[in-house]
């Protein structure tokens, strides 16, 4: 499955980039396929391995902030390989075809 | 922590109430404090117990649908008891005070 | 349509209840059907009227906070009346039926 | 502000790429800065122009599907320019610094 998630610390001021960086580091060190953009980090794998990464990303932020907000969207679909790339390619193909 | 989540099956038509009911049943049978409204089911507890419930709620829907979309928002805050009730009470108190 | 949304101010500390109360007040004064629980406020109506409420709820929080995070989930479906109540009733009916 | 959103049609089967492509086309033709990955499309601008794009993206999908689910996360912060790029750069800078 693919999980896109965002971790936001509360009680540490309005600039949260260094906290988010801690969470992104956890994701990258996991070895799972991942992408980070301005709003979400996406990671792909099975439920246990992905949710373990999300949990550790939340924990590393919670270690430095009194409150953490987690927003997560998951696409659970059997038999999809390399969804992080293939889903975007499918959309681009439809756009190219003008469908 | 409190987790609010929504499970949506794809590929089973536009009426998804019976699938959502399966997910809600899993939550209610968990014994954890929970609430269901028109858009989300909220459940309160520790990470492991709450995420185990979410996983089983996703699994019960995925058993009958080829694809499942999960949307989740969590409020992770140490030392908050009975947040499902107390958070709403706090808001009502502020509203009553006209603050 | 039904919109469930959550407004979180950043840069004002970890206790955000009074800011959230400002947003809920905007929703209640709108006259649209609405519900507030521990994680989201739901409001029902047409796109323009609902999004106008969401915008004003964000604005009232942004007036007192340097940064605001908005999370929103909408269920857009023609021909559904009183969805805030009817969707929950549908789920309860399925649960009662043991389906 | 930056808005990341996802539009999912219900009642059209489990493969929704061509519907999502319609929504992405609306975003790209808007002229606003935007990015699409496997889970969300992000677009940056003022409230009115961004929400007009989101509405038209929902409408184009709703024209072909009986029900549409919209998930949206917004980062509302005054004085941030080119947030789609600068937020990622900030995170990378923190990661490089090992902070």
Image: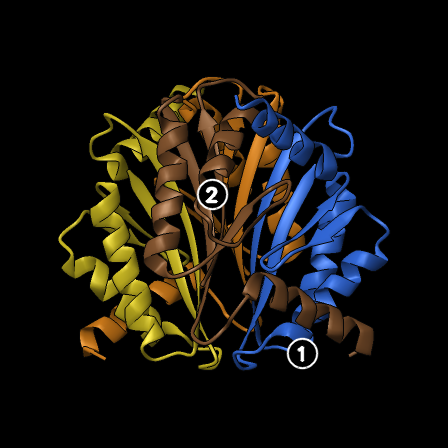
Chain colours: A orange, B blue, C brown, D yellow
Q: Chain of mark 1?
A: B
Q: Are marks 2 and 1 on the same chain?
A: no
Res A36 visible: no
Whether tag 2 and tag 1 are in contact, CB under 8 A, the answer is no
**Residue displayed at 48% across by 80% down:** D11
Residue that numbered label 1 is attached to: B64
Element at label 2: helix
Nearest the viewer among A17 and C89 is: C89
Crowding around mark 1 (Cα neighbors within 10 Å: few <14, some 14 to 19, many 20+) is: few
**Residue displayed at 74% across by 74% down:** C93
How many numbered marks, from 0 up?
Answer: 2
Element at label 1: loop
Res D35 visible: yes
Q: Nearer the viewer, mark 2 or mark 1?
A: 2
Numbered badge on residue C27: 2
**Residue displayed at 19% across by 59% down:** D28
Q: Residue B7 in the image: x percent, y percent? A: 61, 62
Nearest the viewer among D5 and C62 is: C62
């Amino acid at each position: 499955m693919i999980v896109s998630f965002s971790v936001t610390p509360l009680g540490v001021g309005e600039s949260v980039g260094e906290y988010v960086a801690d969470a992104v580091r956890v994701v990258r060190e996991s070895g799972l396929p991942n992408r980070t953009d301005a709003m979400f980090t996406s990671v792909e794998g099975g439920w246990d391995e992905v949710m373990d990464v999300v949990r550790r990303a939340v924990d590393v932020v919670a270690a430095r902030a009194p409150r953490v907000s987690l927003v997560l969207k998951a696409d659970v679909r059997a038999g999809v390989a390399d969804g992080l790339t293939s889903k975007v390619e499918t959309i681009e193909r439809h756009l190219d075809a003008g469908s």
